[in-house]
Image (cartoon, helix red, strand yellow):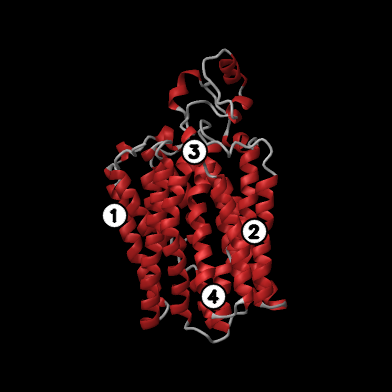
Amino acid sequence: MTPNPLTSSQRWLCGLSFFIADVRDGLGPFLGLFLMGQGWQADDIGYLMGAAGIAGMLATTPLGAWVDGSRRKRALLAGATAATQIVAAVVGALFGPAIMGLTLGLAGPQGLPRQLARNEAWNHAGNVVAAALAGLAGYRWGLPAVFVLMLLMGCGALLCLAGIRACDIDHDVARGLDVRLAAGTPPSPPSAWRVLAGSHELCLLAVTMMLFHLGNAAMLPLFGQSVVARGQADPSAFTASTIVVAQLVMIPVALLAGRYAERHGYRALVTVALAALPLRGAIAAAWASPWALIPVQVLDGVGAGLLGVALPGLVAHVLRGSGHINAGLGAVMAIQGIGAALSPALAGWIVQHGDYATAFVSLGACAAIGLLVFRYGRMNTVWEQRAADASLTAPPCLYVRNDPAMARTVRRGRYKINPER
């Protein structure tokens, strides 16, 4: 199947993904090293980063619902970009659902896997450029130069947003409504909270992602801190190197993930991503050398590159037709944010009362538990279905189960439900 040519707005969306990488992630791993240089202990650094993560987690689900109901997604992203340095933890929760809404509204369900892959590839390329420049600037002028770089990247993101035409965004498709079933859809579809709470598949995915991020979020900053604590590397240069290695791997992995998802779905991508983290933790624990950077961060690139495509794709597939896809993505991000917020505190506590090797193994074990949950707790999930079939050709089981009127319409034979479901 030949992919449709990109519209100008889709090209600007790729540019937005490039520039927004540094704006959304902020100081990232540099923050831990900066505080370490100010005399902070590992557990105190973890508690501070955990508090910021919790604040962002609490804001994610309501902001996702806001994106679902808004027809000004460009304005939302523009406002978030302008304000991100003031209230970074809160407005940062808006980026994921808003980017997803723009992507689905511009590319449509059938073009979603490839556009997600392009977004991720450009986003990781932006991270590579930003990390390389941050490393050079930090080495030459110190960590304050990183703030200037973030300002410049924010300006680039705003320029790309201006290039996305409002008329190119289908806001019904962007929130996951099935416009071809509008005539048979009841006037009062289920609320976002009812849809999200009633989806077993979504809840299971959220728990899986929480366990993954409980192990993943602290792995990179902890690895950088362990090397710097042994006096084996310059803080700014080494941290930039860890980011660059992972992001360079994420670019081709994301593109390949999009192609794979079009043909085979997302389930295998999530499985591989979950399996990579325990191996990554074992290598970091067993090899106390700066050279461990290469395998540790290559595996990081594999996991993040796959999940960057698979997670929003799975949410869109599970909730298609409900009109609450972005709220669903926000809910999953909120639950995984619990794990990400607790991860630095957990890692810092283990290091303070044990050592770095024990912390790496413990973080990897969290993802291993998540893999077991994902593989054996699926129950009637729909994840095996190909992403190519997720083109909104039928109302999802969730919507039919929750609405008797739609169920009667389906029983009369007006719409055909995929037998795999």
| Viewer-nearest residue: 124 or 32 | 124
Q: Earlier in the sequence, mark 2 or mark 1?
A: 1
Q: In the figure, 190 relative to 361: above or below?
A: above
Q: CA distance from mark 2 to mark 1?
A: 38 Å
Q: CA distance from mark 1 to mark 3?
A: 32 Å
**Residue 7 shows in this picture:** yes
Q: Which mark is residue 159?
A: 1
Q: Earlier in the sequence, mark 1 or mark 4?
A: 1
Q: CA distance from mark 4 to mark 3?
A: 36 Å
| Viewer-nearest residue: 36 or 17 | 17
Marks 1 and 4 in Cβ contact (< 8 Å): no
The residue where tag 2 is placed is: 367
Residue found at the far bottom of this picture? 231
Q: Which mark is residue 387?
A: 3
Q: Secondary structure at mark 1?
A: helix
**Residue 57 shows in this picture:** no
The residue where tag 4 is placed is: 292
Marks 4 and 2 in Cβ contact (< 8 Å): no
| Viewer-nearest residue: 361 or 126 | 361
Dot 2: few (<14), some (14–19), or many (≥20) neighbours within 10 Å?
many
Give the label, 4 or 2, closer to the camera: 4
Q: CA distance from mark 4 to mark 2?
A: 20 Å
Q: Secondary structure at mark 4?
A: helix
